[in-house]
Image (spheres, grey):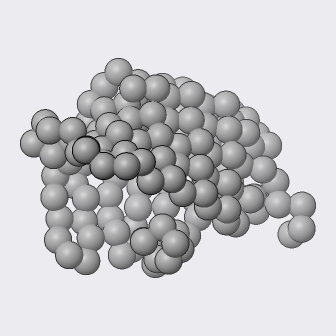
């Protein structure tokens, strides 16, 4: 694992509501062996998930996002496919679906960029359209 700087730009448009944008820069850890890539970081109060560790596992055709802590979930992003997942918060849990419309991973041994565009649904009713761009680069200060 190497120390990295992770920059996340996200957008969420809840059904019939205005788009909400967030930009988040944090330190994290990164690993890649040429077949699979992984990076992890701690969420902050700004994201509303303080105390949660987020991990991305990137393979050639899918990305798995795992959250563990105050919020728990495992979302599978695979372009053109819908996957169900359980979303657990301190207020309760619900089953949701994630339908990945676009998945672009440009990560290598030294970092790079990843983009995901997807919808979230509950009982097959879309509740939000989401996208994020994540950039990972080496932390030269460490």
Residue in view at x 14 percent, y 38 percent: 125
Residue in view at x 26 percent, y 36 percent: 83
The image position of residue 95, as x and y in percent, is: 16, 52
Residue in view at x 22 percent, y 55 percent: 86
The image position of residue 36, as x and y in percent, is: 59, 37
Q: Nearer the viewer, residue 42 or 60?
A: 42
Residue in view at x 34 percent, y 69 percent: 71
From this viewpoint, which residue is outermost toward the right?
A: 140
Determine the image quadrant of residue 117.
top left
Image quarter where the C terminus lies is bottom right
Determine the image quadrant of residue 58.
top right
Q: Nearer the viewer, residue 5 or 39?
A: 5
The image shows residue 30, relative to residue 36, as above or below, that is below
Q: Is residue 56 left or right of residue 89?
A: right
The image position of residue 54, as x and y in percent, is: 49, 61
The image shows residue 95, relative to residue 26, as above or below, that is above
Q: Is residue 127 left or right of residue 13?
A: left
């Amino acid at each position: 694992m190497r120390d990295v700087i992770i920059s996340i730009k996200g957008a969420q448009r809840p059904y019939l509501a205005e788009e909400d944008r967030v930009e988040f820069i944090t330190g994290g850890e990164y690993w890649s062996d040429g077949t699979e890539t992984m990076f992890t970081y701690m969420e902050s109060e700004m994201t509303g998930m303080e105390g949660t560790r987020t991990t991305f596992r990137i393979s050639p055709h899918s990305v798995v996002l795992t959250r563990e802590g105050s919020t728990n979930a495992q979302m599978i992003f695979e372009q053109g496919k819908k996957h169900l997942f359980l979303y657990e918060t301190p207020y309760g849990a619900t089953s949701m679906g994630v339908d990945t419309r676009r998945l672009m991973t440009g990560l290598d041994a030294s970092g790079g960029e990843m983009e995901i565009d997807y919808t979230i649904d509950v009982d097959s009713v879309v509740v939000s359209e989401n996208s994020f761009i994540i950039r990972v680069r080496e932390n030269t200060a460490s």
